[in-house]
Amino acid sequence: MVLAELGGSISRALQQMSSATVIDEKVLNECLNEITRALLQSDVQFKLVRDMQTNIKKIVNLDDLAAGHNKRKIIQQAIFNELCKMLDPGKPSFVPKKGKTSVVMFVGLQGSGKTTTCTKYAYYHQKKGWKPALVCADTFRAGAFDQLKQNATKAKIPFYGSYMESDPVKIAVEGVERFKKENCDLIIVDTSGRHKQEAALFEEMRQVSEATKPDLVIFVMDSSIGQAAFDQALAFKQSVSVGAVIVTKMDGHAKGGGALSAVAATKSPVIFFGTGEHMDEFEVFDVKPFVSRLLGMGDWSGFMDKIQEVVPMDQQPELLQKLSEGHFTLRIMYEQFQNLLKMGPIGQVFSMLPGFSAELMPKGREKESQAKIKRYMTMMDSMTNEELDSTNPKLMTESRIMRIARGSGRQVIEVMEMLEEYKRLAKIWSKMKGLKIPKRGGMSALSQNMNAQHMSKVLPPQMLKQIGGLGGLQNLMKQMGSNKDMMGMFGGGDK
Ligand SMILES: Nc1nc2c(ncn2[C@@H]2O[C@H](COP(=O)(O)OP(=O)(O)OP(=O)(O)O)[C@@H](O)[C@H]2O)c(=O)[nH]1
């Protein structure tokens, strides 16, 4: 069962239970069985699911359920807490410090996405001002060095490897030494994989680890390996001292359950997850937002974080001011498109919003939307400053439209379509007029000042429908406001 479906199945099971007139043990058991089935289909290990069922039964008090309390919420909260508990190994992983040399070794089976993930990890830190370096100690797979070299060159990250040397330990040691001398603060060692767990692989891991003495060993796991996750993770943990997990390929038909099993097997936290083949399709793993997404509840804080990431802090007050004035120009639209493109795949961003499932923005359509945005921006590049900064649509005369089309090599009809899109957005923005702007806290503070009315006006209609209209949105926001844990989930509480 893919992630987006799990939330739906759990919601249905809860709905059925809350519509029963009397909630007795039998009804509760049926509901929990239904949820158990959904979790198993999402690849959560059988033993974990069984323990969770037992725990929930202990927590949920039947008398509370009968006394007119919100049964759904009580059980949903219990499931939420249990899943969070499963993903929390109780101790944090080693965290490298900027400016101080750390060696991080990556291990995992062939094809798990290890090499790709090494570069993503390096790139993520490089963007934050670190000085990372990559060492290719994978001498088993022909082409592994070329792949790492290509990725590293693209991201302008120094790398080390050899076409001639066949001893992975020797390469690893040489690479680490060289980058220590060059004062790199994050030395990443990519190791060999094998198609399956075999003694030779584990022996090689042990030797590389012994020789390079990594501060952290990261186990990379493909999220689509299903119920095999627990045993695979355990096998690696028994050979090298795995201290953290990265789960890859969480996009598309990913099942999230494997992550829970990997944590249980390695007693180490998941620290990042991969959501695509590109360098920036990589996210910090945060337990509460992840579980919230697993249960189809959205990840408001992740969405706001993305916005924080792409709208520079110094531009935020200005943008918020314009937002509150309902003053929307083509230039603002251009800047917002730029920000949107920086955010990465649009579907990935929208899937973080509560109630918005990935199904609404299928993979193929994302590319289409991005291409459209880029097309619009090319047309706007042919506009004058006056046109970009005006809110007066009358400036856009027929001859100007034809000129813009010619200048950007597009059809007149496409320019008109872009202007229609501008009008549609301007209308949405005009409804934001009068929104109270918080003095501090930028975008995330603003999100807490929005009321359901404001939100309903800016959300795409399709999405609003999915949440259950204005009523559904009000409920959702009430939940966000009335429950401390839920607040944490959506970024409003003391997470
Ligand atoms: N969709 C998707 N594909 C990914 C992700 N991470 C890696 N891949 C793809 O998975 C394939 C295997 O990735 P590699 O990085 O070559 O795998 P590896 O584990 O290093 O393989 P070995 O070097 O042989 O051990 C490549 O086609 C990657 O582009 C991800 O998060 N999502």
Image (spheres, rainbow, N blue to C red):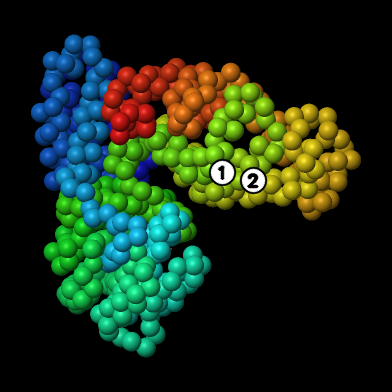
Residue position for label 2: 373
The image's mark for residue 231 is: none
- Most distant residue in the right direction: 399
Quadrant location of residue 472?
top left
Residue 144 in the image: above or below residue 439? below
Viewer can see residue 241: yes
Quadrant location of residue 430?
top right
Circle nearer the viewer, 2 or 1:
1
Viewer can see residue 115: no
Q: Classify 10 Å Cα crowding around label 2: few (below 14), some (14-19), many (20 and above).
A: some
The image's mark for residue 340 is: 1
Foreground pick, 240 / 27: 240
Disc 1, SS? helix
Foreground pick, 132 / 208: 132
Residue 328 x, y percent position in the rendering: 67, 30
Quadrant location of residue 429?
top right
In this rendering, position of residue 396 left or right of residue 97: right
Seen at 53% across and 28% down, the residue is 459
